[in-house]
Image: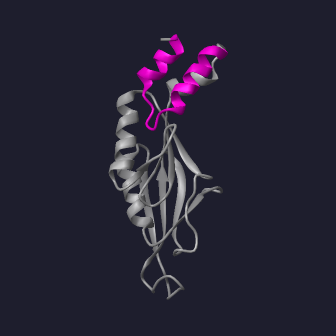
Amino acid sequence: MTKNVICLWYNGAAEEAANFYAKTFPDSKVGAVHYAPGDYPDGKQGDALMVDFTVLGIPCLGLNGGDAFTHSEAFSFQILTETQEETDRYWNAIVGNGGEESHCGWCRDKWGLSWQITPRALMEATTGKDRAAAKRAFDAMMDMNKIDIAAIEKAVAGK
């Protein structure tokens, strides 16, 4: 068993979320579903209580703990992408499945979990040695929801 697992709290939808992540992201899968051995405050014996799953190689545990806690942007998965097509595919999968757009490459899935869909080109542009180009790329990003790689490259070039 892995020593460090990210535990994500859900209100009854851990298995649905895990299945969505497994079909959306490579190196992702649903492992065991653990059913409640007895009734508990937010469920009944036999309900899916915990779900072991992996997102892009990161081990996670989905806990159906009820509505006491919700996700926030204080925690997010950052997914580095290589192309606009890959950026669009992940963004559209999350937003198109009941999620919502946010700013600067952030979006939220329908369960409230935040994702940063971040092209590697953006990271390289904003952390590069040419600080003026980095600022232009950063300023361009600040006006975006989903990141547009061509627009970032244009900003870096000063066009």
Say whether residue 135 is left or right of residue 30: right
Q: Nearer the viewer, residue 5 or 68?
A: 68
Q: Nearer the viewer, residue 15 or 32?
A: 15
The residue at the point 45 percent across, 38 percent down is 145
- Which colour style is shown? one colour
Q: Residue furthest bottom?
A: 39
Q: Position of residue 49 (x, y in %)?
A: 48, 75
Can the viewer see residue 124 in this picture?
A: no
Q: Quadrant of the N terminus?
A: bottom right
Q: Position of residue 75 (x, y in %)?
A: 60, 52
The residue at the point 41 percent across, 60 percent down is 17
Count the numbered circles shown. Answer: 0
The stretch drawn in magenta includes residue 142: yes
Q: Position of residue 67 (x, y in %)?
A: 52, 74
The residue at the point 50 percent across, 88 percent down is 38
Give the magenta range: 131-158
Say whether residue 93 is left or right of residue 151: left
Q: Position of residue 68 (x, y in %)?
A: 57, 74
The stretch drawn in magenta includes residue 96: no
Can the viewer see residue 134 in this picture?
A: yes
The residue at the point 45 percent across, 86 percent down is 44
Q: Main secondary structure of the magenta part?
A: helix
Q: Nearer the viewer, residue 7 or 72?
A: 72
